[in-house]
Amino acid sequence: MRVSARGALLSATCSSLAAASCSLPFDVRESSIDGIHNALLTGLSTCRDIVSSFIARIEEFNPTVNAIISLNPNALDVADDLDARIASGNTTGALFCVPILLKDNFDAFGMPTTGGCRALADLHPCRDAPTVAAFKDAGAVILGKSNLHELALEGISVSSQGGQTINAYDQTRTPGGSSGGTGAAVAASFSVFGTGTDTVNSLRSPASANNLFSFRPTWGLISRAGVIPCGYTQDTVGAIGRSVKDLAVAMTVMASVGYDPADNSTSLIPPELLGKDFSASVHGGTLEGKRLGLVLGFQNFTDTPETTPVNDAMANMISLLQAAGAEVVNVTDSVYNATALIADTDVQQHEFRQLIDEYLGQPNLAGTFPRSFFELYEETEDFLVIPGQYGYIDTAIHGSTTNTTYLTKHRTIRNLVLKLHSTFQELELDALIYPQQKNLVVKLGSPSQSGRNGILAAVTGVPVVVVPAGFSSPTEDAPVGVPIGMEILGLPWTEDKLLNIARHVSELAPMRRMPPFAKRSVEVTQRYESVPVITPNTDNISPNYPLGRIRA
């Protein structure tokens, strides 16, 4: 499919409903849910044209960031069905004709769920994950699947099936992860928003690294069924987007699943949150009088090119918050040390083997693929585990949820939960704030995504919203700088408060910038008769990450 820059002649027949006239091009760059709905309901564009425009951007720009594993072959058919609904006057649905991407560990009928793992390329779910079904019920168009760090086990966002995803702002750096494909794709306007999972940092890291917003919900708010798991204790699902308002709509739709017998954590949802419209939370309110705890232990005050930009961005953000009337209180307790917390509380590797066995062994998965952890890692070589995760796999092999280390970590988690609540009570806080990562997102080929601060929310189960906080200084590799994000963490079930704070912060300090490589508009110059096939670049995997190995 040929595409051209804006200004080229629109040479082919515009997609349209029967007897409808040619619609004007709708510029999907930085588009929002409201913008798409306005274009549809005023007749500016059709759903097919909108979906086609996103596909054209993916064809044009995905070779730069390598964010997409596959496109949904039915996306245009879905768009045509939605156009027929417009013609009949039926345009209900909070996400009507909103194109979104799924991290490729979400089950969606009609598409493989690979987890970024080549050995799982033929894994075909026979039904949608409940959250995916909710998206479809709300009228969303599933455009395709985004790349991720393989099986969501780290934050480099490299996989045997999808290759290495590239940061949208600095092509020498990683995009964060594990939901890095979603982050790079949404930054480049390949969709309105996308999904991700978060076991330690995996929604918030790519949002921070790609100048985006994200949320990790309270543990139990949103069903995790139909998603390849990492750990029962820490797994959550959420979304990454370009605005707080779009995030709030995504949260509303995902949380509409409510109690799900397939994920008993959802039994914890307070009755007053069932069916809640979180999009209402972004209206009203103020930062005046809000007490925000700045976690000093989550910053590295050593003056280096990688850490100083983060500290400068946070200092600027604090000044803006104080000028808006918020009180910023230093939190100095030594318990808030991300490195120590990772060592003392991260339990996912003890749970991974059992959970992956349960997922791969499900009868509702069709295709030829490994049906267990050991079949995957010991009977094939079609996988990628970076050397920094060899210890993770070794623990998964030899550990269990009954050994002393696992039980000790859970006791530490319980104490940390109490400490976190005490901190809020004693300092009378509305939220904690801190940079998502102490340093700039790491370079391609790095041994790990070091310096991230996501562990506190991950093990305590509390909600977090990430907002853009600034950029490093521009360089040749990063023409507008490398993005920096800030986490806003609250107590359980306070998503509405966090979204409201995030909306005010986003207006106080508008930090969203398009990545320079993707600023150009792309026109659809011929009608798509079918959805094109995207082939990820797996030749760009660093030699530092040998395939098919789980030990040195």
Image (cartoon, helix red, strand yellow):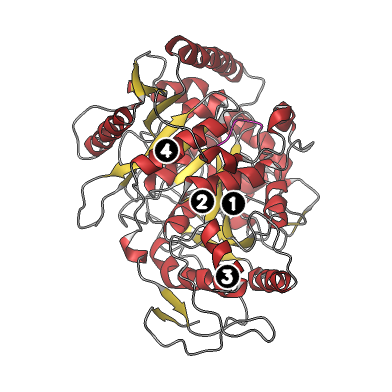
**What amino acid is at disc 1?**
Gly
- Does the residue at mark 2 contact the one at mark 4 (Cβ under 8 Å)? no
Residue 164 at least partly seen: no
Give coordinates of residue 370: x percent, y percent. Answer: 68, 51
Marks 4 and 3, Cα distance to the nearest angstrom? Answer: 30 Å
Q: Is residue 268 magenta-colored?
A: no
Q: Can you say whether 18 is above or below 263 in the image?
A: below
Cα gap from disc 2 to disc 4, whole angstroms: 31 Å
Instruction: Name the front one of labels 2 and 3.
Output: 3
**Which circle's residue, 2 or 4, is located before the other in the chain?**
2
Q: Disc 2 versus disc 3: distance between alpha carbons?
A: 37 Å
Q: Which residue is mark 1?
A: 115
Magenta span covers which residues?
216-220
Judge left or right: residue 154 versus residue 371.
Answer: left
Task: Kindly indicate the quadrant of the structure image that contains residue 120.
Answer: bottom right
Count residues near mark 1 (Cα–Cα under 10 Å), then give few for <14, some for 14-19, many for 20+.
many
Secondary structure mostly seen in magenta is: loop
Q: Which residue is mark 2?
A: 148
Which mark's residue is nearer the viewer, 1 or 4? Answer: 4
Sequence order check, earlier mark of 1 and 4: 1
Between the residue at mark 1 and the residue at mark 4, the CA separation in whole angstroms equals: 35 Å
The x, y position of residue 424, in whole percent, is 48, 16
Q: Identify the residue position indicated by label 3 in the image.
A: 42
Dot placed on the residue nearer the N-terminal end, 4 or 3: 3
Please tell me how crowded label 2 is: few (under 14), some (14-19), or many (20+) other residues with Cα within 10 Å.
Answer: many
How many angstroms separate mark 1 from mark 2 (CA)?
7 Å
Instruction: Name the N-terminal-most of marks 1 and 3.
Output: 3
Mark 1 or 3: the one toward you: 3
